[in-house]
Amino acid sequence: MTDLADPDDSLAVQSTDPLADVDAVLFDLDGTLVEYERSPGELLSLAFESAGYDPFFDVDEYFARFEDHLAPGVSIREGRANCFAAIADDCGRDPKEGRAVADAFAAERDHSRVERLPGAKSALDALAGDYPLGVVTNGPPEMQTTKLESAGLADYFETVVFGGHDAPAKPDPEPFDVALAELGVETDRAMHVGNSVSSDVAGAHAAGLRSVWVPAEDGSEPEPEPHHSFSSLADFVDR
């Protein structure tokens, strides 16, 4: 375990036990508890093939530009289509080609085809008897609920807040506030576990929660710095 707490931070965890003085634990979903069986790179290749075009961009460019096309009220599917159209235009191609690839990508994406990440179920089993648990995830309710149910994790959680729908998307503090209000727990008695520094760690800090970054990347210097960092969910609960 690597304890990254800043002793001068008012939210810093003074104990080596990250769950000391914690009354509730919130989790991110994608990349923290579950992941798709097929990677975005695999789906993008299938999408180009299905749409009938030779690949004119790769998954790294998709990831680099996707967030530029997200905004309140814009669905993930719509944002992806706008992203692919913009990339096509920059490549000197008809933006309609990019939208056709985006449609094919969406058709190939099956939200029920997810798998639990290592340690996810055992971590929830270890926590569920002692703490109320919640999920704060960015994404449409139907899509994210399908993932939770398909992974067999839905019954662990007393609340699920869908950022971008029930409240603004993370890292806005509101979805964390909504989740804790439903659990009846104060922010300074709660912890959020997630894989994204920019949305999970930053969002937890903005809301006044303690943060756990899982899985942490070795040798990295995340900003903002999480209060605790673990290489896996198993390490988080196996103390």
Image: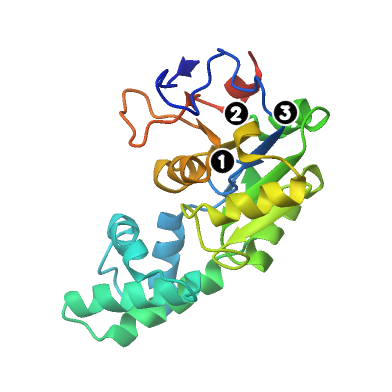
Q: Is 98 located above or below residue 185 in the figure?
A: below
Q: Helix, strand, or loop for circle 1?
A: loop
Residue 198 appears at what percent x and percent y? 39, 46
Circle 3 sits in a helix, a strand or a loop, which is it?
helix
- Of labels 1 and 3, earlier in sequence is 1
Quarter of the picture containing the C terminus is: top right
The residue labelled by disc 2 is 233
Residue 38: give x, y in percent of width and height. 53, 53
29 is higher (above) or lower (below) than 209: below
Whether residue 239 appears in this view of the structure is yes
**Badge number at residue 122:** 3
Most foreground residue, 11 or 84:
11
At 68% from the left edge and 67% from the top edge, which residue is drawn?
142
What amino acid is at disc 2? Leu
Mark linked to residue 125: none
Q: CA distance from mark 1 to mark 3?
A: 13 Å
Say which of 137 and 21 sits in front: 21
Mark positioned earlier in the residue sequence (2 or 3): 3
Q: Residue at x 44, y 66 (%)?
A: 46
Residue under the image location 49 percent in, 76 percent down = 73
The residue depicted at 33 percent of the width and 36 percent of the height is 223
| Residues at discs 2 and 3 in contact (Cβ within 8 Å) | yes
Residue assigned mark 1: 32
